[in-house]
Amino acid sequence: MTVYYKDLIDELRRPDGGDGFHYNELIEELRDRPEPITISEILDLFNGEVESDDPVIDDLCARFAADGIPTAEPGDEELDEHLLKTERGARDNLHVYMHELSMLDLLTRDEELAAAKLRNEGMQEVLAALATVAPVVDYAQAQFKVYFEKDRLERFMAGYLDVVENLPKVEVVTNNERRDTAGKRIDMDEVEARYRQFEKAKDAYFNQPSYRRGVKRRNALEAAFGCFKFTTDPYQTFQDIFLEKVQKLAAARSQLRRLLMQAGVSEDDFATAFEPMITRRNWANLVTSQPDEIRDKLARRTRKIAELRRAVKDIEAALGHDYAELQAISSRVAKGTRKVREATNRLVNGNLRLVMSIAGKFKNRGIDELDLVQEGNNGLLRAIEKFDYTRGFKFSTYATWWIRQSVMRALGEFGRTVRLPANVNQDTKKIYREQQLLTQRLGREPTAQEIAERIGKSVKHVRDTQRYVLEQRTLDAQIGDDDDGTTLGTILADENAESPEEIALKQARIDTIADVMQSLLSVREQQIITMLFGLGRMEEISTTQVANELGISRERVRQIRDAGLKKLRLTTHNRLLQPYAD
């Protein structure tokens, strides 16, 4: 496609960001074009969303012809080139991903700051809207207590949503500051003070009847609950609790509406008369005032209608709001969620190149590069969740630590055949660094004792950790260059298997005992002793089992056994059996 046509398509993008083009404007531009438009160029208009045999292509060509725009038939070479390009792009996912990244703009410091503020603003709006929903704040209060007891509050909240205008200026960020920023622990005194304020506002609001709660108490509760910056899981759980209840309420009201419509109630009557009275006591008076036909049909559905009305009333009572108020809360939640999503997308898209550059430094280490990029993206999302713009750092500076940590943990977990715990991975890296430093300093490989003194660990710990990082070998690996099927597994000794010497001795013992018994004992005595002691290949069985199998009493089995053993003890052949006495 010519440069002229690329520019034309770019100019014809919808101003609202949607896909497609303005057909009328396209026609006006194509009228001034001397050469006909090709099928390949028409396919490019749709950004690969349609194929050359799609009916929409034929329709568009027909419209072009009707408007006097000539279309050129594609040659075989052009079609082959287009198909080859499409196939290659589908195969090379990494190339496609990098191409998409090239079209994303990097964020400036001010744009990062604006996105972070917008995200906090959206979260604050969502929490403020949910602050007066009883199940949500009850759950939040219970979780606060759980994490207070566990002293793991950083897993529940990432900071505060306070608006700060005058930010500190940070010119240079050291490694220590970067770690402090990423792993900053929350000030427990401040959290407890804000939590007590939240509890106080919650009690002041919910301990009053609904008609006495007032705007002042509601605003105080919204401000107290909306100041906490919760981590992703609890923040999403708050919304799920609310949405689940609202969906059940909407379903019950929808079923009730359907029943009333089946009874003959019109849409207008339901909206104006019945809907406002669903939870009111004078519902019966409303039903009585209906025409006889509708009243009779409603009477046949009395039980189901009563169940649905009770469900609606129970849900509204549990949430602390009627349906109209819940709709208003839902609108506020949706508005805040859109802000959070928009801000998150800005921060993600503006830093995907950063993820790519960091992940690229760890490729060829046992994990596919795209998988490393995905792990880095997870770290980026974690950084967005934890980022506190009030400290003055750039977001990309802060996110680098989280991205690198996520990639390195993935390498430690999935880059090896046998997964090592995270703390062991850290120890192996520390030992490796010290080993390199000591090698440069001493001019030789350091001993385990020297490494242990440097890192403050025992010699045994150093040696064990060094063994962990030895390369794994598969038992199916071929040994030598000859293709004779010899593998590592075939030449390793099986510690559980009997040696040839043991097998030979065992067989010699069996043969000797059999010869002696055959020369001295009767057939019945041989049979019973063989069964009782598991001689040869038979397993040992009990006296009762022998008696049942031979059809004799257990006492008779014991008599025959004792007689046979007595013969073996008194015989001159006893010396042959002595080596096997054990």
Image: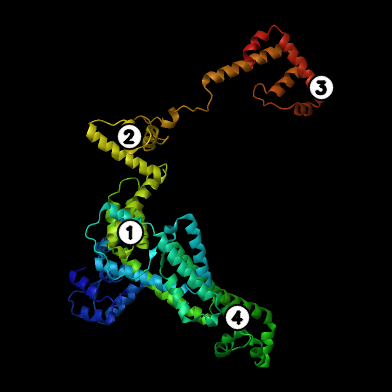
Which residue is labeled 2 in the image? 453
- Residue 30 lies, in percent from the top left, at 22, 78
Q: Amino acid at mark 3?
A: Arg
Q: Which mark is residue 90?
A: 1
- Residue 463 lies, in percent from the top left, at 37, 33
In this rendering, the answer to whether 304 lies above or below 370 is below
Compared across the picture, whether 5 is left or right of 329 comes to left
Numbered disc in front, either 2 or 1: 2
Numbered disc in front, either 2 or 3: 2
Q: Residue at x 42, y 35 (%)?
A: 476
Q: Residues within 10 Å of mark 4 (few under 14, many from 20)?
A: many
Q: Residue at x 35, y 74 (%)?
A: 56
Which residue is labeled 3 in the image? 556
Which residue is labeled 4 in the image? 256
Marks 4 and 3 sit apart, C-alpha to C-alpha, by 85 Å
Q: Are marks 2 and 3 in contact (CB under 8 Å)?
A: no
Numbered disc in front, either 2 or 4: 2
Q: Residues within 10 Å of mark 2 (few under 14, many from 20)?
A: few
Q: Residue at x 42, y 58 (%)?
A: 154
Lower sequence index among marks 2 and 4? 4
